[in-house]
Amino acid sequence: MDNLSDALEKLKLASKDSATDSADSCLDCLLKALANNHTEASVKIQEMGVLTLLPTLLSPQSSCTPKVANLIAELAKNEFMRGPCVEAGLIPPLIQLLTSSDQEVLLQTGRALGNICYDSHEGRSAVDLAGGAQIVAEHIKSLYQNTEPENEKLLTVFCGMLMNYSNDNDSLQAQLINMGVIPTLVKLLGIHSDNVALTEMCLIAFGNLAELDSSKEQFASTNIAEELVRLFQKQTEHEKKEMIFEVLAPLAENDVIKLQLVEAGLVECLLEVVAQTVDGEREEDVAQLKTSSDLMVLLLLGDESMQKLFEGGKGSVFQRVLSWIPSHNHQLQLAGALAIANFARNDGNCIHMVDTGIVQKLLELLDRHVDEGNVTVQHAALSALRNLAIPVVNKSKMLSAGVADVVLKFLQSEMPPVQFKLLGTLRMLIDTQAEAADQLGTNGKLVERLVEWCEAKDHAGVMGESNRLLSALIRHSKSKEVVKTVIQGGGVKHLVTMATSEHMIMQNEALVALGLIAALDLVAAEKDFVVSSLVSVLHKLLSDERSAPEIKYNSMILICAAMGSEPLHKEVQSLAFIDVVSRLRAHENKTVSHQASLTEQRLTAQS
């Protein structure tokens, strides 16, 4: 360390006299000291006040300038030195050096700026203020076609500098996107794909920028999909593939890029990775299998990319994905079920899939997971069945295949995501299917569980779906036995609460179900109607100007039905319904105004 102290003293003198030769040897000594003991030497250099001397040594004309920039780059490897480098005023002279034509000066300056920016708010702000990123971006634009090794080294440093400058900072990333760096970097990747260091730097930069929504449009206008797929096909190492995956995942969130990736052959690459890793037990095999199958599912979220891969149900990709469902591997079972759910996004696909026996595969998968209980697989398989049950022609076929029976096996699940999908699947299945609605609606255990879930205030989705299924069982069966089961199970009060929902569709479903209860078994429901303040709820719905026409119409139908009960009739009289109803005779909707006249007559006749 004595040598270091001497060198520091000499450097002070040299900076005053602008003595280049003596400064040169001092800088060699300092760089050597940093190489031997980085942290200790950095502390000493800072304590001796050397940083404030360096701006004067950063002259474009000086021969020791590259060494000074190299020294700053080495010092800034320490986190605690980055702030002091900014405070010592090193950024403006370093930015000025970016106009140099000397390759070594540019290289060391790029390193110095990149290291100062690394994880440093002060560093980034100072570079931003001095306009450094714009100059570096211009350099990359002018140099990207040059494939000489020295130039590739410089490009790597410049890409790294921009990456450190913008990492985890949305506004600086947006700034780079506005400068147009994305198209340049994509071209650069294509030209220099054999240079490992430069390629990696490009990928990290893409990974940073791709997180921003504003970048997706620019990426979509380039041939990024082809470049990444080409690069992926070359890779043999797990780490390299992972780096590309990290760029592909955020990019594949964009529907235009999804289609570009499919057309560039990414799916074939992913299927190959799956085939290679499905039986692997190494950690990296498991990771690659998950990443590639997840990405495959993501590509299917785009309507065009999904339809292209479906190919009328004859596509080889679709067939391969089908083979994942009976797999022994949970990750593949999950991806297979999610893929089917994504393919099942239009009626044509759903009808084709049900006709070709996919339901049986999903039911067998679910059966395997009743006891094994992998929640994500249960959730995915139920999602697929729910989507497949949407077209009317599929419902009876799926019911005949025993879908409802298998789904009911999960009634005891304590996992809200599974509960939610189970409810949605049953609701889709019984839509317009009176016999199935009757069968399920008289299942005391199911109704009991629905009533329990209607109170799941921590899980709004489960609560909403339980109410909707309870209502659907009554609406589609129109059965007195179902009504009786719901009344005995304590479901009436939940349907009354559902009528006050903020969602009009749920309000209406509740009112229709309550109307059927009143029509089919008013005597049995009377007590529940009174306790749950049904009449008061209906008064509010009819008085509220925001209520939709169908809400007003069904509320009046229900009032007329409720009049058959003495206690309910008394409540109707006490709330002066006649005033509200008579105003509705002038309603612009003819069905509402006609029903208001009928209801008024009924109220008047029985007052």
Image (cartoon, grey):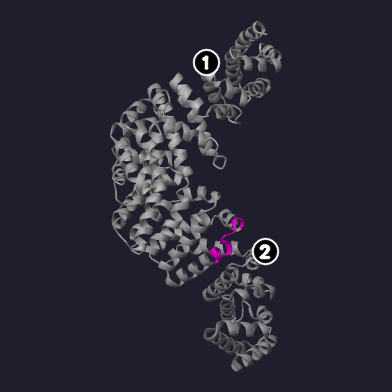
Q: Circles 1 and 2: CB distance less than 8 Å?
A: no
Q: Is residue 63 visible?
A: no
Please name the residue that numbered disc 2 is placed on. 129
Q: What SS does tag 2 mark?
A: helix
Is 358 displayed left or right of 187 in the figure? left
Comparing labels 1 and 2, the label whose residue is closer to the camera: 1
| Residue 277 image point, x, y percent | 31, 57
| Residue 165 image point, x, y percent | 58, 64
Point out the stretch of residues depicted in magenta.
Answer: 161-171
Quadrant housing the N terminus: bottom right
Residue placed most toward the observer, 297 or 278: 278
Q: What SS does tag 1 mark?
A: helix
Which residue shows up at 68% across the image and 21% down it? 543
Q: Is residue 279 visible?
A: yes
Q: Distance from label 1 to label 2 (Cα)?
A: 75 Å
Is 226 displayed left or right of 497 in the figure? left
Q: How many marks?
A: 2
Which residue shows up at 62% across the image and 8% down it? 602
Q: Main secondary structure of the magenta part?
A: helix
597 in the magenta segment: no
Which residue shows up at 61% across the image and 65% down it? 132
| Residue 219 image point, x, y percent | 48, 51
Three-letter amino acid code at the position of disc 2: Leu
Above or below, 13 against 425 in this view is: below
Three-letter amino acid code at the position of disc 1: Ala
Q: Quadrant of residue 456?
A: top right
Which residue shows up at 36% across the image and 63% down it? 283
The circle on residue 519 is: 1
Above or below, 337 against 510 in this view is: below
